[in-house]
């Protein structure tokens, strides 16, 4: 297994070859030399590529990092600016990483820094040369990192942060509020900071871009694991609501049942009714709903759907929009709706406009 320093050196070799291959695709560019680990005025450049374009010499000053998240891009840009101040007017700054997200690429463009990643994304602009290439795929490592950020324990932390994005949290307070270990807080904190979705001030950690966080969570969302149970009830209207209240009232004690999906949205931001009612519940909550709502087998067509949750995290983040009516939080409801097809996505967008607008 490579040590961190050895691993970075190995990646620098890959980065240098990827840069050569990119430049070879432009006939007007002649690559005269590519150097690694070049010392210049007590500074080490990761890669220095010497090229000529129509007889004019240029130097591509490259900073290489094993992490291409926006926070690391910003640090690399500062280093590149420092190099350029001591190198010369013919130097072109380039950042290279294993993968650069669209947000990271946008940051490079904003700072007028060329970029290249090993997935195939690239942009170089200098002396009449314009190279730009984008690929839609994300590497498996990036997908795994995102999924881990939204796993049940991590999601408990995110729900707490999204209740009030402007609030700053100390590690111990956040761990207690989310019901997770300090290790989980550390992992989530790193993921948020790397993507610049959160920042740290003298009071602690707070979200800086809750919309970007919610967008990413929506795109990677997997509904809470649990058994889907379908039933039929003859109750409707106020009779149904009154019966449901007798069960939902215990959800704020860490168990029981709560309205979810379209049923929760009806109370949080009414948009469109469906013919079914949706609940999250634990085993005791399922039985309580079965009795209170007079549920029977769905031979006449299901109109009540209960998901018996394996993870109790969503119970920690309920909301009571009306006396005795307990629902999944606006964030959880939004995610569930967004995953519920076209009609659900419309309801999700409506709920977000009504309940999930945060001051910038």
Image (tube, rainbow, N blue to C red):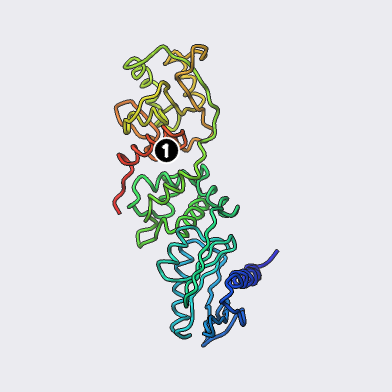
Quarter of the picture holding the N terminus? bottom right
Q: Is residue 136 visible?
A: yes
Residue in the image at 42% along x and 71% along y: 112
Residue in the image at 34% along x and 14% along y: 239
Q: Is residue 35 visible?
A: no
> In the displayed image of the protein, which residue is found farthest to the bottom?
41
* Position of residue 73 measured from the top left corner of the image (x, y, whole percent): 47, 66
Q: Is residue 359 above or below residue 113?
A: above
Q: Residue 197's image quarter?
A: bottom left
Quarter of the picture holding the C terminus? bottom left
State left or right for residue 320 relative to residue 20. left
Q: Which residue is mark 1?
A: 332
* Position of residue 214 measured from the top left corner of the image (x, y, whole percent): 42, 47
> In the displayed image of the protein, which residue is found farthest to the right?
1
Structural crowding at the residue carrying mark 1, measured as other residues with C-alpha within 10 Å and reported as few (<14), some (14–19) or many (≥20): many
Under tag 1, what secondary structure?
helix
Residue in the image at 50% along x and 58% along y: 101
* Position of residue 14 measured from the top left corner of the image (x, y, whole percent): 64, 69
Q: Is residue 259 above or below residue 121?
A: above
Q: Is residue 175 above or below residue 6?
A: above
* Position of residue 104 measured from the top left corner of the image (x, y, whole percent): 47, 61
State left or right for residue 12 relative to residue 150. right
Exactly how many numbered labels are in the figure?
Answer: 1
């Amino acid at each position: 297994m490579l040590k961190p320093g050895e691993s970075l050196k190995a990646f620098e070799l890959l980065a240098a070859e990827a840069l050569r291959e990119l430049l070879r695709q432009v006939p007007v560019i002649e690559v005269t030399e590519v150097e690694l680990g070049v010392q210049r005025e007590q500074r080490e450049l990761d890669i220095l590529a010497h090229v000529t374009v129509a007889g004019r010499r240029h130097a591509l000053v490259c900073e290489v990092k094993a992490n291409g998240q926006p926070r690391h891009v910003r640090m690399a840009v500062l280093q590149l600016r420092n190099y350029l101040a001591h190198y010369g007017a013919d130097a072109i700054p380039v950042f290279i990483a294993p993968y650069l997200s669209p947000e990271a690429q946008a940051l490079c463009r904003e700072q007028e820094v060329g970029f290249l990643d090993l997935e195939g994304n690239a942009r170089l602009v200098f002396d009449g040369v314009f190279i730009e290439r984008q690929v839609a795929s994300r590497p498996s490592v990036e997908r795994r990192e995102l999924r881990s950020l939204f796993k049940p324990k991590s999601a408990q932390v995110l729900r707490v942060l999204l209740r009030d994005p402007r609030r700053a949290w100390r590690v111990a307070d956040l761990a207690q509020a989310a019901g997770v270990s300090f290790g989980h807080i550390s992992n989530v904190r790193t993921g948020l900071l790397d993507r610049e979705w959160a920042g740290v001030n003298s009071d602690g950690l707070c979200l800086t871009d809750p919309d970007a966080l919610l967008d990413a969570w929506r795109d990677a969302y997997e509904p809470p694991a649990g058994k889907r149970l379908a039933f039929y009830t003859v109750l409707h209207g106020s009779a149904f609501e009154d019966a449901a209240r007798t069960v939902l009232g215990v959800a704020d004690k860490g168990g029981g049942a709560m309205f979810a999906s379209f049923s929760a949205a009806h109370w949080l931001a009414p948009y469109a009714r469906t013919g079914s009612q949706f609940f999250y519940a634990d085993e005791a909550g399922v039985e309580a709903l079965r009795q209170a709502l007079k549920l029977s087998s769905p031979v006449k067509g299901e109109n009540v759907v209960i998901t018996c949750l394996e993870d109790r995290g969503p119970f920690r983040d309920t909301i009571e929009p009306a006396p005795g009516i307990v629902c999944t939080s606006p964030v959880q409801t939004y995610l569930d709706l967004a995953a519920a097809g076209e009609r659900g996505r419309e309801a999700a967008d409506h709920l977000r406009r009504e309940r999930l607008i945060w001051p910038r």
